[in-house]
Image (tube, rainbow, N blue to C red):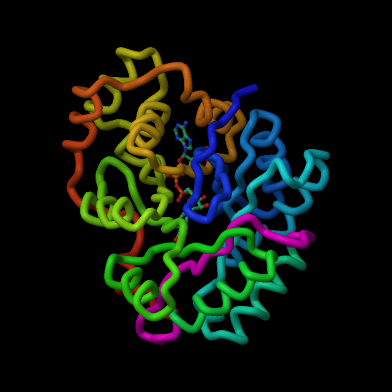
Amino acid sequence: MTQVPNVRLADGHDMPQVGFGVYKVPQDETVAAVRTALDAGYRGVDTAVLYRNEAEVGRAVAESGLPREELFVTTKLWNDRHGYDSALAAFDESLGRLGMDYVDLYMIHWPVASLDRYVETWRALLRLRDEGRARSVGVANFTEGYLQRLIDETGVTPVVNQVELHPYLNQPELRAYHERHGIVTEAWAPLARGGKLLADPVVTGIAERHGRMPAQVVLRWHLQHGDVVIPKSVTPERIRANIELFDFALDDDEMAALDGLDVGERTGNHPDNVGP
Ligand SMILES: NC(=O)c1ccc[n+]([C@@H]2O[C@H](COP(=O)([O-])OP(=O)(O)OC[C@H]3O[C@@H](n4cnc5c(N)ncnc54)[C@H](OP(=O)(O)O)[C@@H]3O)[C@@H](O)[C@H]2O)c1
């Protein structure tokens, strides 16, 4: 079974560098997929209210028999629950569905700047952190400007920002901002959702040289950049392959070739454009 290394967050907690994403994993397939992932060695699971499978994630964790403290469970506050009291209530509902008494990481899913309530929501997350019910608190889809406002108005920097990131969207300025502020970069859609990136000749060429799957090459590129990755799959062989990343390495030329694929292309929305 693969042992996944941890990254240390600025608040002192450890987070597995590879976790299992469950966006678009149907409810009736979630328990099996998460169990396959846990059996393969994943210890992080990334869910959200939006994904409608928090309860199934909780069931898979419970049925696995693994000690809760060995797992790192993330969930997120959805866009319709911004605001202090609303966020606290939304968190309780998520914990209830997960059947847990804490989560390892609670995140604001999108800033929804048009509502102008994300600072208030962040204050609620800080309370949950202080109560120990969310061990760590972070954000997703925050640009530099939104992050800076949280820091300026509350004095507390999110420990993780989960953003769309892959070789077609490398976001070098945002990465540099994260580095300056001690924020861990977590890549969503690390495989660019399994589309044309995995057939790109640069990726397939490197994969052939190493005798690896294209997805493993892309995930290895993330790890060497220091990203946390949360690839999603419902296919058992892929779930297992996506953490077999620690027995090969990309050289500088291969990293540079993959860096060179950046065209700023998103598979999802720009954070400025996501409304309630
Ligand atoms: N914060 C946010 O706003 C946000 C947004 C999107 C996603 N996320 C999180 O990030 C996670 C990952 O992102 P994502 O699910 O959008 O995309 P992804 O992980 O980049 O790609 C998933 C797709 O790639 C395929 N795939 C997986 N492993 C593969 C392999 N080894 N070879 C070939 N194809 C492979 C999967 O197919 P099969 O399943 O059919 O095997 C699926 O279609 C999500 O599950 C979620 O937890 C967060």
> What residue sits 39% from the left and 50% below the top?
185
Q: Is residue 172 magenta?
A: no
Judge from the rendering whether residue 67 lies leftward or rightward of residue 86; answer left or right.
right
Residue 131 point in image, percent of width and height: 68, 70
Q: Is residue 110 magenta?
A: yes
Which residues fall within the magenta stretch?
A: 98-118
Residue 200 point in image, percent of width and height: 25, 32
Q: Nearer the viewer, residue 9 or 115?
A: 9
> What residue sits 36% from the left and 54% below the top?
164
> What residue sits 42% from the left and 65% below the top?
157
Res 43 quadrant in image: top right
Res 141 quadrant in image: bottom left
Residue 58 point in image, percent of width and height: 75, 54
Q: Nearer the viewer, residue 231 or 229?
A: 229
Judge from the rendering whether residue 55 lies leftward or rightward of residue 263; answer left or right.
right
Q: Nearer the viewer, residue 17 or 79?
A: 17
> What residue sits 57% from the left and 43% below the top?
20
Judge from the rendering whether residue 110 lies leftward or rightward of residue 44; answer left or right.
left
Residue 235 point in image, percent of width and height: 58, 34
Q: Is residue 135 above or below residue 193?
A: below
Judge from the rendering whether residue 32 lies leftward or rightward of residue 188; answer left or right.
right
